[in-house]
Amino acid sequence: KIIENILENYLVLDADVFFLKPTQFIQNGIPTMSVGDEHHIPYFIHMKKLHESFEKVHSESGICHHMLFNKKYINEIFQLVEDKHNKQFWQVFILSVTEHLNHPLHAEESGASEYELYFNYMIKYHPDKIIVRKLNWKNISERSIVTTNVSGLDYFSICAWM
């Protein structure tokens, strides 16, 4: 809604991701979604605060440090949240993050994930509009990047939080 003339499908890629192999994000005209193994409960609590229909519906995680989003489905999510709360989506999204209240001020806990929200929404409401695939990837700590074997990986993420 903010970036004029943005394409219908757009890739969001975390800044700490390094692809090692050519990677396609659309196969036979259908966007692909990669998966991870994270299961951070505060993300799903946050999703429920946005709308009661938002829930984890897939055994794997949408947390994989990148995602191809589609404007049409983002607008659907925004509309559901805005109709329920009578506020703009971004306001509800931010005000619904409360995970930090459970930790000391210096903690770096994450209380929301747009990747989990979109991933599970698409699987629940538009499973025929995506392809879920598993790429070979891993999180690598800043301290171990030099000693980590990345051969065979499609990509890796250098995480400051590790």
Image (cartoon, rainbow, N blue to C red):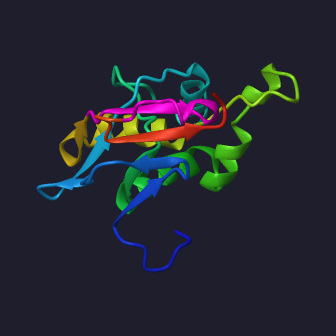
Q: Residue at x 43, y 37 (%)?
A: 64
- Quadrant in the picture for the C terminus: top right
Q: Residue at x 51, y 30 (%)?
A: 147
Q: Position of residue 119 (x, y in %)?
A: 38, 39
Left/right placement of residue 114 relative to residue 28 reads: right
Depth check: give the residue in front, 36 or 16: 16
Q: Residue at x 71, y 28 (%)?
A: 109
Residue 31 magenta? no
Left/right placement of residue 29 relative to residue 32 reads: left
- Outermost residue on the front side: it is 147
Left/right placement of residue 93 relative to residue 83 reads: right
Residue 138 magenta? yes
Q: Visible in this render: residue 53?
A: no
Total numbered labels placed on residues in the image = 0
Q: Position of residue 47 (x, y in %)?
A: 55, 33
Depth check: give the residue in front, 15 or 133: 15
Q: Position of residue 63 (x, y in %)?
A: 46, 35
The segment highlighted magenta reads 134-150
